[in-house]
Image: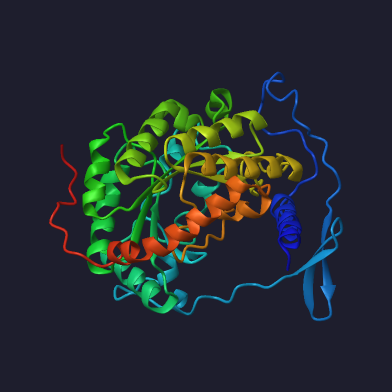
Amino acid sequence: MSCAGRSARTRGIFALVCEQHRLAPQTPSIAVKRSILADRAMAGDQNRNRIERAGDDFVIVDYRQGFSYPVRLSPEVPWYTRTTSRGVQMQRIGVLQGTYLGIYISNSCGFWYHSPALNCKFCTTGLNVGVNEVELKDVDDVVEVAQTAKTESGVTFIHFNSGYQTNRDLDRAAPYVKAVKSRVGGLIGVQLTPSRDLWKYDRLIDLGADHFSFCYEFQNPEFFAMICPGKEKLIGQKTFLRALEYTARKLGKGACSGEIIAGVEPLEDTLAAIDMIAGMGAFPTVCIFRPTIGSDMDRWPSPRYEDMIVVYRHLFDACRKHGIPMDVTPNIEVSLIVQPGDTRYLADSSLATTLYDMKLSLMRKVAKPYFWWASRPRRITASEELRA
């Protein structure tokens, strides 16, 4: 397929991502200042993708470009239904999210337990954690599941995340990071609410953390405060940015990420967030907003496909401009988001783009020995108890 054909097909896939969960336009369930949303197009166009039967199977048809995509459910991972040595079903400890293992390490997000609740308005974590998985994981169970995922599913990246844990987030993650890095190996990612105690990130690095990501969600301060009241009241937007800048400087360009949601705040704010994150030496992870059933924003409309094209083209340009390595780490395909490297097919053809492609290709080859070295199990003498 020609480059132009791949780009057209990629745009078609982007349309599916944008509209997969599009809802009929409704009045948002959050009281939003009219001045902020004056330029928001709430009137949605008719869904341009349909799921249709094709014999015994189903396909999604994009009527704008004439593409069709077969619908196939991923087979269940064989080890999901097995139990650990302690008798806990493995899928209640961790699950594959693409090619990596995701583990929610602790209790449901603390924002849900305030009165009134301070949870992020797009989130349903408080409704799910502890239902489909164990709320508080045993370290030995986590190690056993990580080893199984590595051996049987070829996992090379283990990602620990959690909701708000009253500023003890990194403390609770430390034993898991150390145990998995020393007993299993692999690249270790940590995604937790940020700490003002920046020295704790140094300790997590000593224990084996290779990557930090921070979900600060929105660049616009009013949207941040309105949609993420817990993060605004108990953490503060600047704390997210300070922790991102600190860890990006510690681990090097492209090793950390700032995660934002596109399709809710004004488009110019999302573009500014991308520029700021890339300027810090981190890579921007941009999630397309999708209304989740049961959340406070489940009647909020999905964004326009055309706007998301602008966002992801800008993401590619920002990473190129700041020299952010995209998709250099091997064997990471994420099922929940659009990866930065996927935006390549939306970029305009130019000499700068070609040179950037060549640079990334060279980096992937040169970095392979490093990632092999970084992924090996290693003896860690640092204590998992975080003390200043």
Q: How is the image coloured?
A: rainbow
Q: How far across and how far down the image is residue 182, in percent?
A: 22, 64
Image point (53%, 44%), residue name: 320
Which quadrant, please, contains the N terminus?
A: bottom right
Q: Is 241 displayed left or right of 76 in the figure?
A: left
Give the residue at the far front of this rendering. 351
Q: Is there any visible trace of residue 187 in the rendered image?
A: yes
Answer above or below: position of 338 versus 260: below
Query: Which of these two is toward me, 97 or 210?
Result: 210
Answer above or below: position of 47 versus 158: above
Q: Which of the 4 image quarters holds residue 226?
A: top right
Which quadrant, please, contains the C terminus?
A: top left
Q: Is 99 displayed left or right of 336 in the figure?
A: left
Query: Which of these two is toward me, 288 or 275?
Result: 275
Answer above or below: position of 227 versus 369: above
Q: How far across and how far down the image is residue 381, in percent?
A: 12, 56
Q: How far across and how far down the image is residue 51, in percent?
A: 80, 64
Give the residue at the far top of this rendering. 35
Image point (69%, 40%), residue name: 310
Q: Is 21 displayed left or right of 262 in the figure?
A: right
Answer above or below: position of 200 versus 81: above
Image point (48%, 54%), residue name: 359
